[in-house]
C-alpha cells in the first residue's frame, strides 16, 4: 500500500494550538488540562512519542505539548471497507503496528515509513512479545516483528477473535462469541483450551494467571475468571457487572480492575487478586466505564458520562474533569494522563 507521509517540525497550526483555550468555546476548559488537539483515537504512549490513529491518519505527537513529530495519511480509496484501519495500535522499541481489515502494517518509529505489510484480514488489536507480533486473522498469526514473515498460524475457527495477550513463553487468545480461551506456547504448541460457553472478552495475563471477563447477558451481568496459565484450571470465578466490549481486565499490584456497562449506569470494579472478592466499586452517571489504567497508586478511567476520573487504589475519588463528550481510552505518562473523547485528545495533569 502507498501512503502519503508528512514530516512536521512545527505543526501547531495544523493540529490546533497548545492549551485548553485554543480550540474555541466548545472545548473543555478545566484547569487541569495542559493541552488538547482535534485528534480522536486511542492514545498509545511509549517513550518520547504519543501515537494516535484518527480514522485514516496516524499521528506521532510530543507528549509534552502535543506538537506533531510526524504524520502518516492514508487514502480511503486504498481500502475496500470504510473505517478499515484499527485504532488499537501496538508498539515495540522499533515499530508501530497498525491492524486493519486488509492486513497488518509495521511502521518505523523514527518517521512512520512502512517497513512491511502482511496481507491477512484482521479482527481486532495485536500483541507484541517473543520478538513477534501476534494478530487475529484467519486464526492466530505469529509474525516475525523484524521481517514481517509469518512464523506460524493456528486455526481457531470463528470470526470474533479478541486481542491476544502475551506473557512469558505463552500467548492467550479468546473467541468473543463462542467463548473459547486458548493458550499456545511460542513454538505454536497448544498448551490448553477452555470453553466458557458465553460471550468472552480479551484476556489479560499477569504473574502466571489469565484473567478473562465474560457475560451471558450483555449490559446486565458478567463474570470474571482467573485461570492458571500453565494448564487453564480455574483459580476462582466471581460475578460482576457486564464487562464492556473491547475492554480487558487491568491488573494492579493487589487488585484486578474491570470497566463495565449497564442499561442505566456503568461501573468500575476493583477485585482482590487473591480470590476475586470486591474491594470497591464506582458507578457512573451514564451507561459505561471504559478500560482503566493503573499508574503510581492511581486508577484513571473514562466514562460515557463525559468525564475522566482519577481514583486512589482504595477507591477514593481524587479528581474528576468534565470533557463534554464520552471519554474512551486513556494512557498515562510521568506527569500527564492522556484521554481521548469523541472530539479531541486531552493532556491532563495527574496530580
Image (tube, helix red, strand yellow):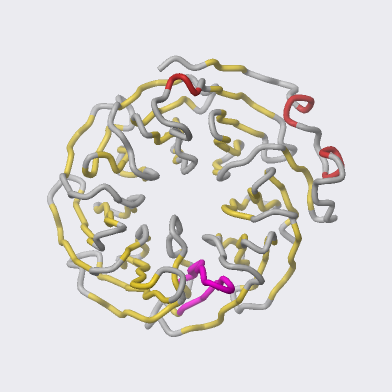
Is 6 in front, or is 170? 6
Residue 119, picture quadrant: top left
**Residue 145 painted magenta:** no
* Quadrant of image for the N terminus: top left
- Residue 71 placed where, x, y %? 60, 24
Residue 134, above or below 217: above
Is 82 in front, or is 151? 82
Residue 315, above or below 95: below
Q: What residue is shown at x 34% (from left), y 29% (from top)?
A: 102
Q: Is 179 on the left-hand or right-hand side of 41?
A: left
Query: Tag count in the figure?
Result: 0
- Residue 287 placed where, x, y %? 58, 67
- Residue 157 placed where, x, y %? 18, 49
Q: Is 216 on the left-hand or right-hand side of 29?
A: left
- Residue 48 placed where, x, y %? 61, 37
| Magenta-tinted stretch | 256-271
Residue 170, above or below 147: below
Q: Is 222 on the left-hand or right-hand side of 232?
A: right
Q: What residue is shown at x 53% (from left), y 24% (from top)?
A: 110
Residue 150, above or below 209: above
**Residue 270 painted magenta:** yes
* Quadrant of image for the C terminus: bottom right
Amino acid at each position: 500500500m502507498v501512503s502519503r507521509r508528512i514530516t512536521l517540525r512545527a505543526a501547531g497550526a495544523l493540529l490546533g494550538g497548545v492549551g485548553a483555550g485554543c480550540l474555541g468555546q466548545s472545548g473543555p476548559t478545566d484547569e487541569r488540562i495542559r493541552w488538547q488537539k482535534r485528534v480522536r483515537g486511542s492514545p498509545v504512549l511509549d517513550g518520547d512519542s504519543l501515537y494516535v490513529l484518527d480514522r485514516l491518519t496516524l499521528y506521532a505527537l510530543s507528549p509534552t505539548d502535543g506538537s506533531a513529530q510526524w504524520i502518516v495519511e492514508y487514502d480511503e480509496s486504498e481500502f475496500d471497507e470504510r473505517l478499515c484501519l484499527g485504532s488499537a495500535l501496538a508498539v515495540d522499541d522499533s515499530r508501530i503496528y497498525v491492524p486493519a481489515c486488509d492486513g497488518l502494517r509495521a511502521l518505523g518509529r523514527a518517521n512512520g515509513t512502512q517497513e512491511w505489510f502482511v496481507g491477512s484480514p484482521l479482527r481486532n488489536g495485536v500483541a507484541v512479545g517473543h520478538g513477534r507480533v501476534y494478530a487475529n486473522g484467519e486464526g492466530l498469526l505469529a509474525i516475525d516483528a523484524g521481517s514481517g514473515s509469518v512464523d506460524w498460524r493456528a486455526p481457531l475457527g470463528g470470526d470474533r477473535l479478541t486481542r491476544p495477550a502475551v506473557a512469558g513463553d505463552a500467548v492467550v487468545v479468546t473467541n468473543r462469541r463462542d467463548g473459547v480461551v486458548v493458550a499456545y506456547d511460542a513454538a505454536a504448541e497448544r498448551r490448553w483450551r477452555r470453553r466458557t460457553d458465553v460471550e468472552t472478552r480479551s484476556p489479560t495475563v499477569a504473574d502466571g494467571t489469565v484473567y478473562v471477563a465474560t457475560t451471558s447477558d450483555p449490559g446486565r451481568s458478567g463474570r470474571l475468571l482467573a485461570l492458571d496459565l500453565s494448564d487453564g484450571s480455574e483459580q476462582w470465578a466471581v460475578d460482576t457487572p457486564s464487562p464492556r466490549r473491547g475492554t480487558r481486565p487491568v491488573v494492579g499490584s493487589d487488585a484486578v480492575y474491570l470497566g463495565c456497562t449497564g442499561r442505566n449506569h456503568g461501573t468500575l470494579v476493583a477485585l482482590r487478586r487473591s480470590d476475586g472478592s470486591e474491594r470497591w466499586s464506582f458507578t457512573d452517571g451514564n451507561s459505561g466505564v471504559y478500560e482503566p489504567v493503573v499508574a503510581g497508586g492511581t486508577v484513571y478511567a473514562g466514562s460515557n458520562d463525559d468525564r475522566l476520573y482519577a481514583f486512589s487504589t482504595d477507591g477514593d475519588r481524587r479528581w474528576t474533569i468534565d470533557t463534554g463528550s464520552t471519554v474512551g481510552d486513556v494512557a498515562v505518562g510521568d506527569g500527564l494522563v492522556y484521554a481521548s473523547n469523541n472530539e479531541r485528545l486531552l493532556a491532563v495533569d495527574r496530580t
